[in-house]
């Protein structure tokens, strides 16, 4: 079966996310919120900033959704380049790569096959149904940046929706007039909680240099199950975060996976 590219399929989900973002934004401007009042008073700075943040969050969403998350290539040239310097300068034991039982490619360490994408993904974290793409070594940092920006937008939108709701005047006419804004407020509240939990959990994983897959399935992963260290890739919070957000290149994780005798597996 031919591997599915990141941009193939998933457009209903992406369209729903885009429509929801701009639909709620429109609802905030059509109801008596602080945003609407500022526009009416001729003070467009905050409304323009809010719309700009929504645009940036939607743009980041599509970047994360459509980019290569770190697909393992058939020829493994990436792995050869990553280990070339070490193999030429020092004596490094041969690294035995696992072969995927689905696509039959040799997997670098921390890679996993995604049945939805039909690809092996480097430093696989999870397949996100909301972005319709895997979260892997290439797009995981941007995914966290997206979550942070989305949380800012959601919190701001939640405050704006609250400013337009006046529960002291609750009545049937009020419900007919503010029903859309009330629904938007409830949706924003749920999304805010989810985004906050996701952001905190992924920042924790990045700080520990682990992934959702490794954290949840340690007992099923051979290179973790046979290792005495709780996390053989952990190099300290600061270095983990620096390399996660600022490395800008693929990592040969085999170099960091050391047994107690100092040999590489």
Image (cartoon, rainbow, N blue to C red):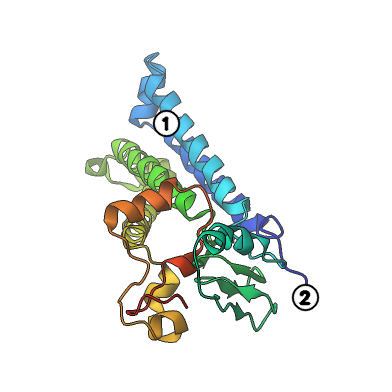
| Pointer 1 local density, CA inside 10 Å: few below 14, some 14–19, many at least 20 | some
The extreme right residue here reads: 2
User: How many numbered markers are drawn?
Assistant: 2
Residue, x 51% and y 67% (percent of image)?
Answer: 124
Instruction: Give the position of the N terminus as an image quadrant.
Output: bottom right
Q: Is residue 9 placed above or below 183 in the rendered structure?
A: below
Residue, x 36% and y 41% (percent of image)?
Answer: 152
Residue, x 58% and y 66% (percent of image)?
Answer: 121
Residue closer to the observer: 189 or 245: 245
Residue closer to the observer: 86 or 102: 86
User: How far across and how far down the image is residue 39, in percent?
Assistant: 41, 20
User: How far across and how far down the image is residue 31, in percent?
Assistant: 41, 34
Which residue is denoted by mark 2 in the rendering?
A: 1
The extreme top residue here reads: 42
Residue 29 appears in the picture as rendered: no
Judge from the rendering whether residue 138 lies leftward or rightward of residue 68; answer left or right. Answer: left
Residue 21 appears in the picture as rendered: yes
Residue, x 48% and y 41% (percent of image)?
Answer: 57
User: How far across and how far down the image is residue 220, in percent?
Assistant: 44, 85
Q: Earlier in the sequence, mark 2 or mark 1?
A: 2
Q: Is residue 148 placed above or below 72 in the rendered structure?
A: above
Q: Secondary structure at mark 2?
A: loop
Q: Is residue 250 placed above or below 39 in the rendered structure?
A: below
Residue closer to the observer: 40 or 45: 45
Which residue is denoted by mark 1 in the rendering?
A: 50
Residue closer to the observer: 255 or 88: 88
Judge from the rendering whether residue 60 lies leftward or rightward of residue 187; answer left or right. Answer: right
Q: Secondary structure at mark 1?
A: helix
Q: Between tags 2 and 1, which lies in front?
A: 2
């Amino acid at each position: 079966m031919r591997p599915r590219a990141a941009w193939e399929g998933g457009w209903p989900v992406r369209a729903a996310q885009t429509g929801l973002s701009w639909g709620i934004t429109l609802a905030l401007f059509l109801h008596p919120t602080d945003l609407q009042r500022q526009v009416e008073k001729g003070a467009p700075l905050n409304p323009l900033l809010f719309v700009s943040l929504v645009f940036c969050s939607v743009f980041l969403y599509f970047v994360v959704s459509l980019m290569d998350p770190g697909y393992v290539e058939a020829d493994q040239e990436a792995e050869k380049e990553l280990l070339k310097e070490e193999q030429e300068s020092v004596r490094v034991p041969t690294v035995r790569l696992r072969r995927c039982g689905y696509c039959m490619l040799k997997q670098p360490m921390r890679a996993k096959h995604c049945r939805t994408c039909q690809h092996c993904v480097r430093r696989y974290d999870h397949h996100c149904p909301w972005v319709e793409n895997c979260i892997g070594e290439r797009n995981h940092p941007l995914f966290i940046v997206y979550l942070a920006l989305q949380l800012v937008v959601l919190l701001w939108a939640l405050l704006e929706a609250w400013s337009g709701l006046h529960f002291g005047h609750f009545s049937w006419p009020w419900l007919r007039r503010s029903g859309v804004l009330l629904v938007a407020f409830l949706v924003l509240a749920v999304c805010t909680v989810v985004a906050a939990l996701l952001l905190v959990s992924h920042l924790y994983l990045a700080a520990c240099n682990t992934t959702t897959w490794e954290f949840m399935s340690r007992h099923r992963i051979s290179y973790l199950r046979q290792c005495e260290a709780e996390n053989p890739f952990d190099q300290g919070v600061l270095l983990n975060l620096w390399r996660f957000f600022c490395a800008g290149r693929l990592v040969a994780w085999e170099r960091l996976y050391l047994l107690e005798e100092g040999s590489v597996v």
